[in-house]
Image (cartoon, rainbow, N blue to C red):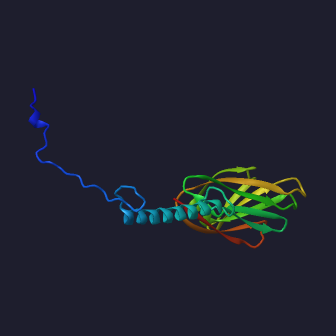
Amino acid sequence: MLSNTFFKAEKEVTLEQPPVRHDGLQIDEHRPFQETFWKAERIAWVGFGFFLLLAVFGVTGSGGLHARMEFGFDDGFVEVPRFSRWEMSDRLNALLPPGSGNHRLAIGSEFFRTFQVEDIDPPPVSSMGSSNETVYHFRSEAQQPLALTMHLRAQGPGIVNYHVSVNGKPAQTAQTIVWP
């Protein structure tokens, strides 16, 4: 059995009464700490708002207003990701202009150092690689544009600069930022 002395306090503790404020409340507040905390909280909210705006504009690589860029070639275009995420699926879309039914899409070799091509729809008839670029050959009905999609996956973070060309037209330079 335990004795009562175990539960008794060795010293008598006196609590100070907090001062009475001008509005009649008797509370102990640390006003300077609270004001500093409020300032930090407001700065954090501004930071969160800034990152939310970046996401809306597509900087996070998961969609948004400026997440993709488009290059025009005659009656067609190539749309590439401006921002992408490491190990996340992405796509390159192209609308190749109508012509003789034979279409070529050339992509610089720098692109393939960062991106893995998982699928091309429709599949190319043939492809030919060199040290500078890979050229995909497609066939479609004569006088019909060809819409194609390349499904991609970024293999590492960083900034990649590459060129894109359609049907032998002058190449245009693209830049994709791959976020970790």
In the rendered view, does 97 fall on the left or right side of 64? right
Give the x, y percent position of residue 133. 66, 66
Q: Residue at x 61, y 63 (%)?
A: 53
- Single out the residue that lies furthest toward the right: 143
State how many labels appear: 0
Q: Residue at x 9, y 36 (%)?
A: 5
Q: Quadrant of residue 142?
A: bottom right
Between 21 and 28, the one nearer to me in the picture? 21
Q: Quadrant of residue 64?
A: bottom right
Between 47 and 21, the one nearer to me in the picture? 21
In the rendered view, does 53 fall on the left or right side of 27? right
- Single out the residue that lies furthest toward the bottom: 170
In the rendered view, does 177 fall on the left or right side of 165? left
Give the x, y percent position of residue 42. 50, 64
Give the x, y percent position of residue 67. 66, 61
Residue 113 showing in the rendered view:
no
Residue 72 showing in the rendered view:
yes
Q: Where's the N terminus, which quadrant? A: top left
Between 126 and 16, the one nearer to me in the picture? 16
Q: Quadrant of residue 71?
A: bottom right
